[in-house]
Structures are given as C-alpha cells and as structure tokens.
Amino acid sequence: MEYNPHHDEYWNDAALEANMKQAFDICNGCRLCYNLCPSFPALFEIVEHYDNDATQVLPDELNRVADLCYQCKLCYLKCPYIPPHHYDLDFPRLMLRSKVTRAKKRGLSRADQFLGNPEKIGKMGQVAPGLANWSLKKPGLRKMMQRMYGIDYRRHLPAFAPVRFSDWVRRHHQSTALALDEVDVVIFSTCTVEYHEVGIGQAVLKVLQHNGIRAAVPEGQVCCGMPALDGGDIAAAVQRATANVALLAPYARANKPILALQPTCALLLKQDYPTLVESEESRIVAAQTKDVTQYLADAMKRGVLKKDFQSGPGAVTYHLSCHTKAQGLKRAAKDLLESIDGCQVEVVDRCAGIDGTWGLKAEYYDEAIKVSAKLTERFANRHDVKACSDCALAGLQIETATDDRPVHPAEILARAYGLIGGSTGETTGAERH
C-alpha cells in the first residue's frame, strides 16, 4: 500500500480504491478496532451488506468511512497488520490518502480552508482578543460562524490570549540572544500556545529556567501542518513542514532536543515530517523531537529537575490523549506529576473525539460528543480535583463537561515550584479564560 504523497501511485484512483478495499477486507476479518471510532462500525456495516465481500463496496461508501476517521491513531497501536507485516496496513494514513486525493480533485471545502490555516485565525483573533472572546460566547454569532465556516455553534472554542506567546518571549525571555552552543533545548511552540494557551509556554520556560536548562524559541515558526492535513490540503502541510524543518534543522544537527508543546504537533514532527519533506534534515528533526511532557518526565527521572516544590496540587485527574498515547507516552505525565510530594494522579484513558479539526465541524459534532462521552463522564463529577491534559484541543471536550479548562502538566509543575500565580505576575491559560 502507498502512503507517500511524493510517489505517483499515491494519486492513482484505481490503486487507492484497490488498497482501500483490501484494507476493508482485512479489518472486517479482524475487528479488533470495533469500538475505537465511528469509522469501524460503519466499515463493518457496509461490508456485511455485501455478504462480507469487500470488493463490492462502492466508492461513496469507501469515502464515508474515510471521512469518519479523525486520525486518532489508536487503531495503528492495536493493529497486528501494520508494517513490516506483509499486509503493510496503516489505516489512518490510508484514510488520509483518500481525503487528500479527493481534495486535490474537488478543492477544499470552506470549513477546511478556514480550519486548515490556524495562523490566519490566530491573527484575526489577536486584533481585538477581548472582542473575539466575547463573540465566541454569543449563540447568534456562533450560528453565523457555523453557516460561514462549518464550526458547530455548540462547540467550546479556545479563547484568544491577550498577547501572543512569541511577543511575550521577546519581552521576557532571552532565548534570541543565545548562541547555538549555549542552547540546551529548543521550543516548538505550536499554534495552540502561540495564540491561545500562552500560559503553557510561560510555564514551560519558567520550569526550564528554574532548573538551569537554557531554552531557545526560534522566531519564524509556523503551524506544524496537521490542520491542513485534516482537510486534505497536502500542499499546505508540505509547505509548513518544509519551513519548520529549515528552521529547526541547525538545532537538530547540533543534537539539541526539540520540545513540542502539544502532543499532536509532536506526533506529526516525529512520524510524518520525514515523509512530507523527504530529506536528511527532516529525519534528524524527527529524531530530535520530544513531547515536552516526555522531556520533563525523563529529566525528572534522571535527577536533572529539582524537587524544591513550594506546594502540591493534591489529587489530579489526568486525561491521556490519543496523540500522547500514540507516541508511547502512557506514563510520562503520571510519573512527572507524582514526583511532586503528595500528588496522586488518576489517569483517564479515553478518546476526546476531536483529534485535530474533525470534532469542531458541525457535521461531526454529535458523533464527537458520543465518542467523548466516557471521557467527559469521568470528569463531570470531579470538581474536587484538578483536571489535567497535555492536549488543549482534547481539553475542549472536558471543558464542555466541567466548564473549566484542564491545565497542562507543565503548568502544574510550575505552580508547584511557585513560579506562576500568586505574586509572580504571570498567569496560566486557565486563569486567563
């Protein structure tokens, strides 16, 4: 099966249809993923309609299953037929290939054009963040937004921060003055932190500084490219990936860890950049990329981080996001937080049903709420504990149940050190909203 958009077969409709029917046949015979996402129940129902003969499935039915795939990657973790098995099955990438090839022929929908460009959205919101945030809470304006851009009016959306993270860095952090040999780690801030959850970036930099770890935040970073990929805009994803690789490659070649502040972005840099860009630099960048929680947990385990905590968070309910788990980081946040005296962590391992832009769209909102029901149920009646998640997008689902934004593990760590809140003058994203 072909998963590389730089190869001609990727764009061959007949080859794609044959690959998808083969995948449907394999999945229908296996069914390990029956309860993971809406794609698989739909797939099984369709194939059963043809007496389990996947070769009879119609193109529109193939597309229906592909459109229900929101790239959580959980099936890849469970699948016994992934490479190097001779079936060579990567279900998420195959479904993405379907979206990409259709987008190239038909063009992008208005929703995908809008959601695929988070920098544009962020800059629009930054013109008057107070007004933008006010408008996000007005049902009438939200219904107008749904008609224009396809974003469901009921969806909790991330608030715009009063200042961009990169602007805050220029004013408060000396990263731009560091020479390459003075840098210990590099921050890939992500659009979420740049425009919305600035408190996460502030907390990370303060924790690193407190522990004598010198961090660079290179200027010129762009979106990782995942939102563009979600809508099938492979050209925009490649363009963004190419720009980020060029920016980060000098640090990666100097063996500097690249810390991505959101798990989806970390996953894309690690797993997809070598395919999107196809260069030695992209492979080096991928190898040097770490999820920031992964880096902090490893540093704590090695004794690099101090334990001079001023307070403890007490009980924490932590959501293990799909893209955190897809990186193999099931214990990272739990181990990190439980290094704080008196912290007890309950892990909720349930999908949030957003995974990029899919769960924001009106056509999938109800399905996304169904997917997240077991997650939100676990948080709805737990107001006595702190809610935590690495993934700010997943946090939107938790927020629908609790009316309170979950905090990032780095924010809990920074507060335990006494670095944010109180008299420090810095606020977390949770306090801003």
Image (spheres, rainbow, N blue to C red):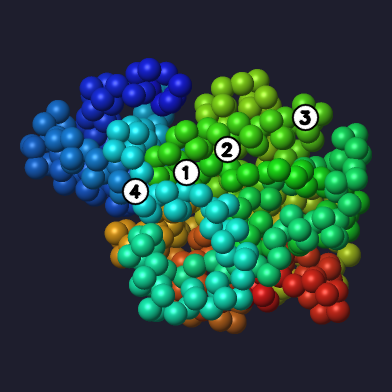
Q: Is residue 127 visible?
A: yes
Q: Quadrant of residue 96?
A: top left
* Sooner in the amino-acid sequence: mark 4 or mark 2: 4
Separation of marks 1 and 2 at Cα, in angstroms: 9 Å
Residue underneath mark 1 = 228
* CB contact under 8 Å: marks 1 and 2: yes
Dividing the picture into quadrants, the one containing residue 423 is bottom right
Which residue does the numbered mark 4 point to in the structure image?
Answer: 109
Per the image, the residue denoted by label 3 is: 250
Nearer-N-terminus badge (3/2): 2
The amino acid on which the numbered mark 4 sits, given as a three-letter code, is Ser
Badge 3: how crowded within 10 Å, few (<14), some, or many (20+)?
Answer: some
Labels 1 and 4 touching (C-beta < 8 A): no
Q: Nearer the viewer, mark 1 or mark 4?
A: 4
Residue with the mark numbered 2:
240
Q: Residues within 10 Å of mark 1 (few under 14, many from 20)?
A: many
In this orientation, which residue lies closer to the viewer: 221 or 414?
Answer: 221
Spatial separation of the CA atoms under disc 4 and disc 2: 20 Å
Q: Nearer the viewer, residue 50 or 17?
A: 17
Residue 66 image offset from top left, x and y in percent: 30, 42
Viewed as shown, does residue 92 lie left or right of 301?
left
Label 1 or label 3, whichever comes before in sequence order: 1
10 Å crowding of disc 4: few (<14), some (14-19), many (20+):
some
Secondary structure found at label 3: helix
Secondary structure of the residue carrying numbered label 4: loop
